[in-house]
């Protein structure tokens, strides 16, 4: 319950109930009272303010009639969801969504009022948690803790528990064609940790090649290592090997199964060219980031680059954050045999960063088939959203081209006219829709993707996709 401090002004022209109403209303708009939060009872608030209970009743009744709070039988009064409040406030004031300020990417959540945030957010990073098997996860957690021995609370193996590594090894082989022994797998809390560990294995100041645009988080991590990063141009098949050969890079970072943000799939010919490049020198390697390859809506998932690596040159990295939940901070890295020897020699003392309890829970979740069933369900959900988004975008085809479809959790829109990325973003924001510019993923400015934005659909409901696209139609067409 929220302990509410209200200062009433007895000499004010406003009635006492109006002051209470306006104070609570302002607290809700400023985010100091959160959605679902319980308010003090009318009796307790009246006693605290030393006013008649009917005064508080009037204030609550007004807030309830306007949709700010709701009464739940035998439980009390609770704050309503903000999205509904924004619509109600617009109707009450007779304003359009364009009259409300919109949070920009440079602003933080703390510095921006909740009412200023976009309602329809086409984030390419969001995922749908509505179908997550919470009951299964709770049951496994309960069983693990009930059956846990003292061993479960010990430090554990540096590479991660052997049972989980064995389970991941089998899963990767069956789903992605990855050929590895459990001993080659290292488990860590997120890709960030694994990349930092990889720096210790590969050494300092290793020249690295990346595409442009690319996954900027990885680029910033490489920068923090003082890795000299070389930008290598890409085409519809991915990183251009002819351009890569002209660099001094020793490592190439690629996303062959679903490149972010372009969504391209690297064909077998280009993959073999990359492997040949890596094999030409002993200390060359390819980092394969396979972050969301599970979600493909036409045909079967594309086999990994590692699956055709006969030279031991691919460092394979994956995560469960997209497939299960962002809070499941469990990633894995498969090292080639030569780098595994270097890891055991130079990095054996780094402890595993994932709790043994979390490892045990995840192991049973995958081993007992729950993960596969969850993946199948999420593929159907995301495929339906993907198809709905493309259907709603049909009227845009004259002025925009669409790429990156058939896989992942976002598509790309390219303006055929002279509209810039900034114009598209601002026009969408004026109608309370947030889209994402591809420039956020560019290491260097390029004119190749002028007027290109990303539309993610993972976290959006069907109704939100329809309404969001309708607003974009009004903004752009």
Image: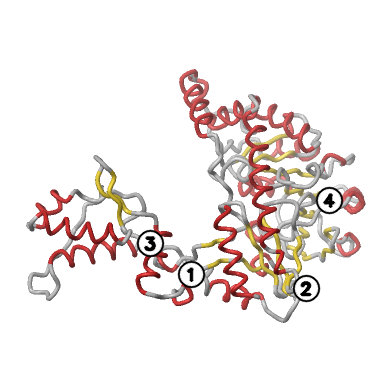
Looking at the figure, which quarter contains the C terminus? bottom right
Q: Earlier in the sequence, mark 2 or mark 1?
A: 1
Badge 3 is on which residue? 85
Tell me: residue 468, above or below residue 399.
above
Badge 1 is on which residue? 103
Cα separation between marks 3 and 2: 41 Å
The answer to whether residue 360 is left or right of residue 185 is left
Badge 2 is on which residue? 448
Tell me: residue 271, above or below residue 23.
above
Q: Residue 410: name its quadrant.
A: bottom right
The answer to whether residue 34 is left or right of residue 209 is left
The answer to whether residue 166 is left or right of residue 460 is right
Q: Earlier in the sequence, mark 3 or mark 4?
A: 3
Secondary structure at badge 3 equals: helix
Q: Which mark is residue 284?
A: 4
Q: Residue at x 55, y 58 (%)?
A: 464
Proximity of marks 3 and 1: CB atoms separated by less than 8 Å = no
- CA neighbours of label 2 inside 10 A, class few (<14), some (14 to 19), many (20+): few
Residue 265 on image: x %, y %: 81, 53
């Amino acid at each position: 319950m929220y302990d509410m401090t209200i200062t009433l002004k007895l000499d004010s022209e406003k009635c006492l109930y109006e002051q209470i109403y306006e104070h609570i209303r302002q607290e809700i708009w400023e985010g100091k009272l959160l959605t679902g939060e319980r308010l003090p009872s009318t009796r307790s608030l009246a006693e605290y303010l030393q006013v008649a209970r009917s005064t508080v009743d009037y204030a609550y009744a007004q807030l309830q009639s306007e949709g700010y709070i709701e009464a739940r039988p035998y439980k009390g009064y609770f704050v309503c969801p903000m999205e509904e409040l924004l619509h109600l406030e617009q109707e009450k004031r007779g304003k359009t969504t364009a009259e409300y300020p919109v949070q920009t990417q440079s602003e933080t959540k703390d510095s921006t009022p909740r009412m200023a945030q976009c309602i329809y957010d086409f984030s390419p990073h969001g995922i749908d948690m509505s179908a997550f098997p919470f009951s299964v996860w709770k049951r496994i957690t309960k069983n693990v803790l009930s059956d846990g021995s003292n061993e479960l609370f010990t430090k554990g193996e540096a590479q991660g528990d052997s049972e989980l590594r064995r389970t991941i090894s089998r899963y990767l082989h069956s789903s992605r064609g990855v050929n590895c022994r459990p001993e080659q797998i290292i488990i860590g809390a997120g890709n960030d940790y694994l990349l930092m560990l990889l720096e210790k294995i590969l050494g300092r100041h290793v020249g690295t090649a990346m595409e442009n645009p690319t996954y900027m988080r990885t680029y910033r991590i490489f920068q923090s290592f003082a890795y000299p990063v070389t930008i290598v141009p890409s085409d519809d098949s991915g990183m251009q090997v002819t351009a890569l050969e002209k660099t001094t890079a020793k490592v190439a970072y690629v996303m062959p199964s679903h490149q972010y943000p372009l969504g391209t799939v690297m064909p077998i010919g280009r993959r073999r060219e990359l492997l040949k490049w890596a094999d030409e020198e002993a200390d060359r390697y390819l980092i394969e980031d396979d972050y969301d390859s599970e979600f493909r809506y036409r045909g079967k998932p594309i086999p990994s680059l590692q699956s055709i690596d006969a030279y031991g040159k691919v460092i394979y990295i994956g995560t469960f954050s997209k497939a299960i939940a962002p809070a499941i901070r469990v990633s894995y890295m498969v090292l080639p045999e030569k780098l595994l020897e270097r890891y055991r020699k130079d990095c054996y003392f780094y402890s595993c960063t994932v709790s043994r309890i979390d490892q045990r829970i995840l192991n049973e979740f995958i081993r007992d088939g729950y993960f596969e069933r969850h993946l199948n369900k999420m593929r159907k959900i995301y495929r339906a959203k993907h198809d709905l988004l493309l259907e709603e975008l049909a009227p845009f085809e004259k002025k925009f081209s669409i790429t990156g479809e058939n896989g992942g959790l976002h598509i790309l829109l390219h303006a055929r006219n002279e509209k810039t990325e900034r114009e598209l973003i601002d026009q969408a924001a004026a109608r309370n829709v947030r889209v994402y510019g591809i420039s956020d993923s560019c290491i260097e400015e390029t004119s190749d993707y002028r007027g290109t934005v990303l539309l993610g659909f993972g976290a959006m409901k069907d109704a939100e996709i329809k309404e969001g696209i309708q607003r974009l139609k009004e903004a752009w067409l």
